Image (tube, rainbow, N blue to C red):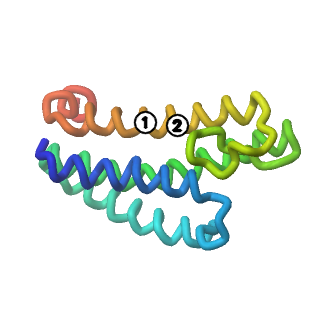
């Protein structure tokens, strides 16, 4: 996998998702804007992934799907937090605006689970779709 394609895929999957995570309470990044960003990327990613023959581009196109997965996970965690705490969860990560607030144990668990899931999606995409051998062994057969 070339470095350029990996960097672009990394920015699309991890960078964009982290930006949406850290700025999720900002007025300029409402749900409409998130959908307008992630939906076209997902459509391009799905079409490109199905037509791609190269492992480099399969990783790039799979990275375009990650922001939509982020939105689904965000909704799930928001619903869990509303059910158990009566409010949206506070992000308990460094450089977050929510760290100063009174965070609960559930907020901490959700924050680190969110970070872990985003990192796992990046690693999964790089390992599975970044190598032709693994992709052909697991997916094509």
Please tell me which residue lies in front, 105 or 73.
105
Q: Residues within 10 Å of mark 1 (few under 14, many from 20)?
A: some
Identify the residue at horizontal 14%, vertical 46% (top origin): 3
Estimate the x, y position of residue 128 in percent, counting from the top left.
27, 33
Residue at x 25%, y 46% (from the top left corner): 59
Residue at left offset 39%, top offset 63%: 41
Q: Is residue 32 left or right of residue 57?
A: right
Query: Are the two marked residues, 1 and 2, in contact with CB atoms closer than 8 angstroms?
Result: yes
Residue 119, labelled with which disc?
A: 1
Question: Element at badge 2?
Answer: helix
Q: Position of residue 130 (x, y in %)?
A: 20, 38
Looking at the image, the residue that sits furthest to the right is 86
Q: Is residue 68 above or below residue 125?
A: below
Q: Quadrant of the C terminus?
A: top left
Q: Residue at x 75, y 31 (%)?
A: 106
Dot 2, how many residues are within 10 Å of its Cα: few (below 14), some (14-19), or many (20+)?
some
Horizontal relation, residue 91 to residue 86: left or right: left
Indicate whether 100 appears above or below 16.
Answer: above
In this figure, which residue is indicated by the disc labeled 2?
A: 115
Locate residue 139 relative to residue 102 in the image: left or right. left
Q: Quadrant of the N terminus?
A: top left
Q: Please tell me in which quadrant of the rendered image residue 107 appears.
A: top right
Rendered image quadrant of residue 25 = bottom right
- Point out residue 117 in the picture as x, y percentages from the top left corner: 50, 35
Tag on residue 4?
none
C-alpha distance separating marks 1 and 2: 6 Å
Q: Quadrant of residue 28?
A: bottom right
Disc 1 secondary structure class: helix
């Amino acid at each position: 996998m070339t470095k350029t394609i990996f960097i672009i895929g990394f920015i699309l999957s991890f960078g964009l998702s982290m930006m949406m995570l850290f700025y999720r309470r900002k007025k300029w990044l409402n749900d409409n804007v998130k959908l307008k960003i992630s939906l076209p990327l997902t459509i391009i990613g799905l079409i490109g992934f199905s037509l791609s023959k190269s492992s480099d581009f399969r990783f790039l196109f799979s990275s375009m799907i990650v922001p939509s997965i982020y939105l689904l996970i965000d909704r799930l965690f928001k619903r869990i937090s509303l059910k158990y705490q009566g409010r949206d969860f506070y992000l308990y990560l460094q450089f977050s605006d929510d760290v100063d607030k009174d965070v609960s144990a559930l907020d901490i668990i959700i924050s680190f689970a969110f970070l872990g899931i985003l990192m796992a999606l990046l690693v999964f995409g790089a390992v599975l779709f970044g190598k032709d051998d693994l992709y052909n062994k697991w997916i094509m057969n």
